[in-house]
Image: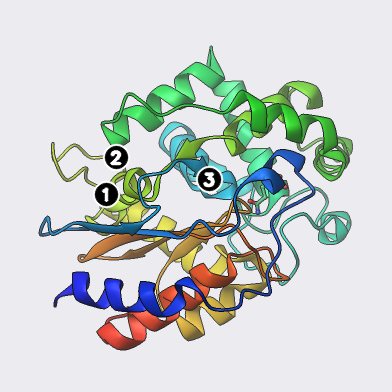
Amino acid sequence: MNFENLIRDIYQKLKNIEDPGETASYIPELSKVDPTNFGIHISTINQSNFGIGNFDDKFSIQSIAKVLALILAYRIVGDEIWKRVGVEPSGTSFNSLVQLEADKGIPRNPFLNAGAIVVSDILISNLKNPKEEFIDFVRSISGNSGLEYSSKIAQSEKETGYRNVALCNFIKSFGEIENEPSDVLDFYFDLCSLEMSCKELSELFLFLANNGCQMKTNKEILNESQSKRINALMQTCGFYDESGEFAFKVGLPGKSGVGGGIIAIHPDQYAIAVWSPKLNIKGNSYKGMKFLEEFTTRSELSIF
Ligand code: GLN
């Protein structure tokens, strides 16, 4: 399969289409990003890698980082984690408060803000220097020591993240947050501020296409069963209340972020990252979704 020609072709076709989306202005720093950025990078199991457009420019990966926090927490506490967060799609938006009341502070899944806040709490309880140890973990799985949080983005969100403050306090009221909400939120906002390019993202996530093993070193990040479970969660919950549509149109496990990035995994084949900052109404990259739909349709490769 010649991914390069296909990616080039779809990129050219979509580059200048009318994009009805909007950048995520609720985090002021994100609305300063040039909305015309558009980049794609694929990293494959057989090492044929390719990028186009702004594939080498760093952007705020936002909720894509929730997958990495979950992986580290899963490595540390194992299946105990599922007592604190569920594995069900929510059918609600990423920052919704509504189900938490009925579910008594147990978020439906780890990719909702509520779920990632609980995962942040678990990491804080289990790590001595949570922020340093988390970024070290991310650098070690990517083999890239240049990965960083963005203090600008984190600060911008800390100033305006009222819903996340509400979520964390609400969960704490059910006794489902162990640490001080301010510490948990501080970690969560830094987590969401991680910056990477499409190239760095697709290289990092390739281990999920390789049964949980880092490609270059063969080091096990997750065992095979854990790796399958993370992919299953990305498939069912990675796009909030658009997860069904993503499965329907794209047919791959994936995760989006409000920075406009999407990572998608084809087990045993590749990891592909797309970045286009304008979001649809569900908070997922408009062009990113379009690109991946066309990519899996025309390559006739999906997990279904
Ligand atoms: N930092 C963002 C928030 O908490 C993450 C949301 C997202 O990327 N979907 O609102």
What's the residue at 49%, 37% (across, down)?
Answer: 195
Which residue was labeled with disc 1? 207
Residue type, label 3: Ile
The image position of residue 154, as x and y in percent, is 67, 30
Marks 1 and 2: in contact by CB < 8 Å? yes
**Viewer-nearest residue: 217 or 35:** 35
Nearer the N terminus, badge 3 or badge 2? 3
Depicted 126 relative to depicted 92: above or below: above
| Displayed quadrant of residue 230 | bottom left
How many discs appear? 3
What's the residue at 40%, 80% (across, down)?
Answer: 13
Which residue was labeled with disc 2? 221
Q: Is residue 179 left or right of residue 6?
A: right
- Residue 221 visible, this orientation: yes
Which residue was labeled with disc 3? 61
Nearer the N terminus, badge 1 or badge 3? 3
Which residue ends up furthest to the left in the rendered image?
Answer: 46
**Viewer-nearest residue: 167 or 42:** 42
**Viewer-nearest residue: 18 or 196:** 18
Q: CA distance from mark 2 to mark 1?
A: 8 Å
Q: CA distance from mark 3 to mark 2?
A: 20 Å
Graded by Cα atoms within 10 Å as few (under 14), some (14 to 19) or many (20 or more), the crowding at tag 2 reads many
Residue type, label 2: Ile
The image position of residue 271, as x and y in percent, is 30, 59
Nearer the N terminus, badge 2 or badge 1? 1
Q: Helix, strand or loop at disc 1? A: helix
Q: Nearer the viewer, mark 3 or mark 2?
A: 3
Residue type, label 1: Phe
Marks 3 and 1: in contact by CB < 8 Å? no
Q: Helix, strand or loop at disc 2? A: loop
- Residue 42 visible, this orientation: no
Q: Helix, strand or loop at disc 3? A: loop
